Amino acid sequence: MSSATPTPTRVRRLPVVGALRLGRPSDVWFKPALSVVAAVAPPSLLLVALGRLDLAAYTMAGSLCALYAHHRPYAARAKVLAWVVLGMLGGLAVALVTASLTRNAVVLVTVGALLAAVQKAVCDATRVGPPAHVILTFVSSATLFVPQTLGQVPGHLALAAAAGAWAWLVGMAPAPLRPHGPERRATAQALHTAAAYAETARGGEESAGARSAAYAAVHAAWQTLLAARNRPSTTRRALERLVVRAEVALAAPADTDPARLRAWADAVRGSGRVPRTGDPRRDEGSLGERDELVGVAAERAVAPRPLWSRLGPLAPLVVRTALGCALAGYVSLALGADRPYWALVTAASLYQANLTLTWSRAVQRVVGNLVGVLLFAAVTPVARLGPLALVLCILACNFGAEALIGRNYWLGSVCVTPLALLVTELPGYQPTGELVTDRVVDTLVGALVGFAAALAVTDRRAGRRVERALTAVDRARERAARLAAGPAATPAALEAARRGLAAAVVDLRATADAAAGEWWQRALPQERVVLAEQAAHRTLAATVRRQGLLPDPGTTSTQTHTEDTSP
């Protein structure tokens, strides 16, 4: 056994004010906000007309699936939304059957905690994106505490399935009007962030944060473009060329015209023709225009990693979720709460990539919920004017939650909290003071107990993942450098090596950032991470030059060449 003593990481200050700082809204904040209103409104209003608003909780379970997959191309979105609906129905079915078989609160909390852990694992492993497992956990946990009989289960599942099918249609509705909207937005974001990084680098004020953000945006754009594995269209190929230009700008910022990148981004964000980038290598009489996309075609043909291989690193998060949700529910029961699932869901919503982010989410959740109960108390007199008024208040809270949550989680929670409280009134009105008190207590219990569980379950493998990411970057860099120096490297090999190295750099930064927020572990090799990133960036620049991908310096941002990419 080695006698070396592990060097602990420095004590971290837990952010409070910083966790509440507002950011810029998402470029498409209105899309999920409008989608959820369009998905929730028709089923709910139909139930109002039929006088069965007590069933709206089941239709709302399906309707909330419209919140997912807004960043994905429509071909991929269709599959993801279908899986989300099926996952929601699966969790709902388990909850309804359990509720019909037992009223033992401890058993119900235990089942809810296990469901939350499974939902967390699947959503993180599949990278389904926001709102991830939280909505699924809210639906399954809430229905666990609604009295059921086995005979009622099929009908309730049918209502949720019908609403889920409607949510699928709502999510796919923009496809005929703007078939490449998600790809365009991702490409525009990549171009904008690349331009911002190139501008700082050319001004001698290169920022590691700007560089990491730019690489992450470019990587996200590639993931979006590659998500649809069907045959690429003319538009998608043109967008791929633009992302290549953004990638080139990261490798050689000194040779980049930021104004040109921004002009392309503005043109892509609209609905007109996709700008033509031009091909500097064609002017040199060497390789053809299609060569720059051979690596893209090769990557599109590669099958994604199997799901099981992505579950291993998630083990600490899954254990934290199961333990934290169960303990939060048990403590809530011990305090005499009627709705322990509020504490359970609060705990489930906390768990992020590391402890520091988990703490920030706990602060955001508590602040948002405390303000939210005040908003609930203010809107309750309006909501109780009648069933239609209640539904309209629920729709307003749905819209507000999705419109604001992109600024900061706590701001969205201000609307989520009255939404959850209003949903409890669908079967009938309840004392406002009792609801507010229970929600405040359960929020505090869920946040405190949930974070305590996160402290108890440490992620000792975070440092190992950083080491593996460093090794992957070193190998990718050596391969790219060898090809760039060799005289007989093919365009496909160069492109694949460059793309592989860029993806490895993004993964290294994400892994290092996640590990840096963990506690109780050895000191991380931060210097090695920085040196590896710098060496990788130099190799990327050399590879770009070897490929002949540098922009033509004589071309200005006012270039007007376009190609017709009409569907």
Image: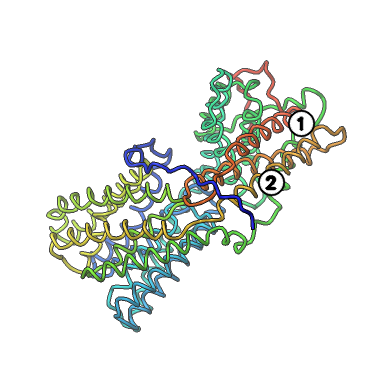
Q: Which residue is mark 2?
A: 471
Please name the residue shown 62% across and 61% down the image.
309
Please name the residue shown 61% across and 17% down the image.
556
* Mark 1 or mark 2, whichever is nearer to me: 2
Please name the residue shown 28% across and 48% down the image.
368
Query: In this orientation, does residue 567 appear?
Result: no
Say which quarter of the image contains residue 195. top right
In the image as oriented, which residue stretches furthest toward the top? 554
| Relative side of 206 to 429, left or right | right
At label 1, counting other C-alpha atoms closer than 10 Å, the crowd grade (few under 14, some 14-19, many 20 or more) is many
Give the percent coordinates (x, y) of residue 76.
56, 54
Helix, strand or loop status at disc 1:
helix
Say which quarter of the image contains residue 408. top left
- Res 288 label: none
Q: Amino acid at mark 1?
A: Gln
Please name the residue shown 77% across and 38% down the image.
494
Q: Which residue is mark 1?
A: 547
The vertical placement of 331 against 563, above or below, is below
Please identify the quadrant where the N terminus is shown: bottom right
Helix, strand or loop status at disc 2:
helix
Residue placed most toward the observer, 14 or 538: 14
